[in-house]
Each structure stands twice: as structure tokens, then as C-alpha cells.
Image (spheres, grey):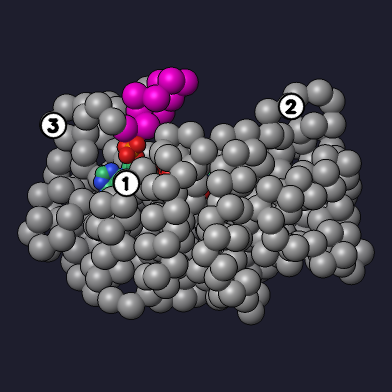
Amino acid sequence: MDMQYRRLGNSGLQVSTLSLGSWVTFGNQIGDNVAEDLMKMAYDNGINFFDNAEIYAQGKSEIVMGNILKKMGWDRTSYVVSSKVFFGDGRKKPNQTGLSRKHIWEACHDALRRLQVDYLDLFFCHRPDRNTPIEETVRAMNTLIEQGKVLYWGTSEWNAQQITEAHLYARQNYLIGPLMEQPQYNMFHRERFEVDYAPLYKNFGLGTTIWSPLASGLLSGKYNNGMPEDTRLNLKGMDWIKDIWITDEYLTKVKNLAALAADLGTTMPCLALAWCAKNPNVSTVILGASKVSQLEENLKALDVLPFLTPDVMENIETILGNKPKQPTF
Ligand code: NDP
């Protein structure tokens, strides 16, 4: 199926339903030549959004992506590139992390330099910062937009109340509020996306660029029969991901889902990705890939959408057994 595009929330910006991110991979797990092959394959298949952050490989991920963008020479109007501010790029002195006006301003300029672009299409506050008033952050983002250095700003893993506060402050002061949120969303992580944010889609036209759609690879089914060597779970410092995701309960569910995928004539990664894309509140599903073959497979996910009938969705719910309860009043 050809790539599909969705509006990012209530903005006029169109993002491909599948996009490509660089966490763990660019500047770290994979060589720059693989990163280039991935971006090229993505772009050639209609992906128009590339996701990045100051903290990814401590700035190196943005440098690698910037070099590829420059080398490819793609029309700047044909793609959307992001950065995120909060965790810093490895430097940890006061003001080198967080969401103060100072760090937001400096992180934006560092990202522009590393990515070798004149403006960021999307700029995310990577986490909430309890040490900075939301008002300061909203004003700093609004200033960057007015300066033409950022086109749209958003949040990542902010709770519904924090996003609402940012919007209300922006509205009261005729400033531009956050357009999009970047939350984790996958078959095993649903509550906040499906329940907490529900009023935000309606009230603010919130767009979403969702992360870890395969739960760091668990939902690809690759761990169903033991632990392959060359995966992110074996990288130094990644034990915490293993601890979260590699449990008997999840593995049993993934095995049952894989059987369902096979019945549908598809693969486990495509089923899991299509399931995310099926949710109309998802603007784009950010793919991660350490190999070109993975991206090649994942790009077929949209072909599965027509097979996700109400009956199939119900069967998936039965296997997952984790449908979040919506409030009744
Ligand atoms: P996924 O959950 O989809 O995990 C991707 C990883 O799963 C790949 O790197 C690969 O890892 C494995 N994989 C992917 N496809 C296949 C396949 N077909 N077969 C077998 N294994 C496969 O997404 P990510 O966790 O990478 O998140 C995607 C993006 O979201 C990130 O790049 C980043 O841009 C963003 N993100 C944002 C966060 C935030 O806080 N805002 C947090 C995390 C991510 P391997 O080969 O190593 O096993």
C-alpha cells in the first residue's frame, strides 16, 4: 500500500502514518551507512517525518541525521524533522538540561547546528520539568516559533493536566500552545493514550507521534523462542528494557498474537504496528529499526489495516486482556 498521510492534530501539517526515529540506533547501535540506508528507504517509501532528540547518542544521532539530510539533498519542503529538549546532550551542569528559557534556546540552536537545518519542524519538551514554571516554557517555545526557528512545538510524556495547563496559559496570553505529544503507545501500554488524553484530542486537537510501537522489539515476536544476540536488549545499559518487557506473561501473549497474525497472512511486527495505526488519534507511528530488513518488513504494516475488522480487533482484545476502562461520567 502507498504511504498514507495524516494531519498532525488540528494543524495543517501532514505527516506520514509511519515515520522513522533514531533512538538507540543512530550514532550508537548502527553504523552511519546503515542509518543512511534506513533514511533512504524510508524516504523512498513516502516517510516524511524523521524523529530525533538532543539526548540521542548525546548529540551524535542529530549529527548523523544532519549529515545524511545534507548528503541526500532532499527538498527541505518534502520532509519534517524534529528535536527534543530536556535531557541535554550529555553535559549535566545547571542549565544544560531541563525546560528553562535558557536551555530551550540553547538546545534549539545546538539541534539546528547538528542537524544542519535552518528550522526545526517539530520541537518537543522531552519530559515535564518540575523546576520550571510551565509559563516560562510556553513563552520560550512561542518565541522560537515567532523567530522562525521552530514551526510547531509539543510535549513528550507530559500528563494530561500538564498539557492542559500549557494550553490554557497559551490561550489566555495569545501564545501558541503545544500541538503534539509524543507518548509511548503499543499493545501493552495503553492507559494514558486511550483514557487520560481522550479529552485533549477533542478539546485541543492534540496530535500524537507515538513511540516504541513494538515495545522495543518485544512485539516483533523475535523473543518468542529465546534471546537473539544482536538486539538492543543486549546493549550495555539497556537491561532496564529487558526487565520491563521480557516476562513470561508478555511472551505468552505475543505467541498468541503471532498465531493470529499468521492466520491473517501477516507477520507479528506488521500486526502490532497496524494495530497502533488503526487508532485515529495516532497521527504517526514512529518506527525504530537497526536493520534495513526490519524497516522493509515494517513498511508493509499499513497493508494490514483493512484486515483489522471489528471481529479481529475483538480477538486481539481477548488475547491482550488489557483494554483500559473509559470513565463513565
Ligand atoms: P520499537 O518499539 O518499534 O522498537 C524498535 C526496535 O525493535 C528496533 O530498533 C529493533 O531492535 C526491533 N525491531 C524493529 N522492527 C523489527 C522487526 N521487523 N523484526 C525484528 N525486530 C525488529 O520503537 P523504538 O523503541 O525504537 O521507538 C521508535 C522511535 O520513537 C525512536 O527511534 C525515537 O525516535 C522515538 N522514541 C521516543 C521516546 C520519547 O521519550 N519521546 C522514547 C523512545 C523512543 P533490535 O534490532 O535492536 O532488536
Is 316 included in the stretch rendered in magenta? no
Residue 116 percent coordinates (x, y): 69, 56
Which residue is rendered at x = 84% and y = 31% of the image?
95
Label 1 near label 2: C-beta < 8 Å?
Answer: no
Secondary-structure class at tag 3: loop
The N terminus, quarter of image: bottom left
The answer, for residue 283, to whether it is visible in the render is no
Tell which of 270 and 254 is nearer to you: 270
Q: Is mark 1 within 8 Å of ligand 1?
A: yes
Where does label 2 land, which residue? 91
Tell which of 116 and 209 is nearer to you: 116
Which residue is rendered at x = 21% and y = 33% of the image?
223
**Camera-nearest label, 3 or 1:** 1
Please give the range of residues in magenta: 231-241
Report the amino acid beneath label 2: Arg
Apparent side of residue 71 relative to residue 124 in the rendered image (left or right): left
Secondary-structure class at tag 2: loop
